[in-house]
Image: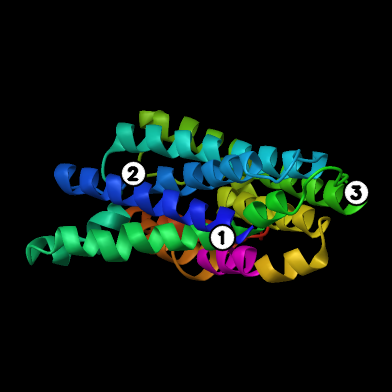
Amino acid sequence: MFEALALNAAIIVALALIQWAISVKINDVSFIDAFWGAGMGLVAVISWLMVPGTPGPLATLIMAMTAAWGFRLGIYLFLRWRREGEDRRYRRMLKEPREKGQFAQYALTRVWLMQAGLLLIVSSPAQVGILASADPAPITKLAWTGFALWCLGVFFEWVGDWQLARFRANPKNKGYVLDTGLWRYTRHPNYFGDFCAWWGIWLTTAAAGWGYAAATVIGPLFLTFTLTKWSGVTLLEKGLHRSKGNKYAVYERKTSAFFPLPPRV
């Protein structure tokens, strides 16, 4: 297992270095968001291919859950980057390094290598769960519970992204805030979906043994912290307050930040 995890790490770091070189050439790192999702799907597939013997049903389920989540997100974010260009978050983050002529160094250490490390940590439940689930590891009730939670997350993330894409595609909505559909019940249905999907993958991994779950619980815990306190809700809403002004403040007062709840009066 350690050899397989080391190979996953080597592949992700190598891909990060290649994409760093591309980002320096085009002066934009924003497509790293696509790498975040697709990279997790990739290490799941690689782990499944390296399972000793025949991958069991549980290994295949974890791989399919992770790959479906990761590759869908990767494609969605890559197409969004191609359509909209540089993300404002990265523009603000890299403004000073650009002015000082330190873009390449900062992009390498604070963006690509850091994200590669975090990607491996967050996806650790999938990697370990797959590698630990050789034939004849069955799909237990606990695994099905994790799968149900994953399905809930996928619904919120996929439908939330679709609703947001449709809203942004209408020029009449410029300057307004999406407050219908899933966005009526949570200001970030896509982030809530990520949360449910990865806790679901972690629960499915627990079916291979609680020792594996305990060793990898840092993955969903760190993702939860990232989504709610670090680069998710907190960072995104700073920009939304600047761009949407009072409209977003009103939306914020009546709508749950993360967990879906009925709108407040």
Dot 1 or dot 2, earlier in sequence: 2
Give the extent of the magenta segment: 217-226
The circle on residue 140 is 3
Query: At label 2, which amino acid type do we have?
Result: Phe
Query: At label 1, which amino acid type do we have?
Result: Val
Q: Identify the residue under disc 2.
A: 31
Q: Position of residue 48 (x, y in %)?
A: 65, 42
Q: Please report the residue visible at 61 percent of the width from the left and 46 percent of the height from the top.
A: 47
Q: Is residue 59 above or below residue 238?
A: above
Query: At label 3, which amino acid type do we have?
Result: Thr
Q: Quadrant of the C terminus?
A: bottom right
Q: Crowdedness of circle 1 by 10 Å Cα count: few (<14), some, many (20+)? A: many
Q: Secondary structure at mark 3?
A: loop
Give the distance between the C-alpha atoms of the residues marked 3 and 1, in whole angstroms: 23 Å
Q: Are marks 2 and 3 in contact (CB under 8 Å)?
A: no
Main SS, magenta residues: helix
Residue 122 in the figure: left or right of residue 260: left
Residue 239 in the figure: left or right of residue 44: left
Q: Secondary structure at mark 2?
A: loop
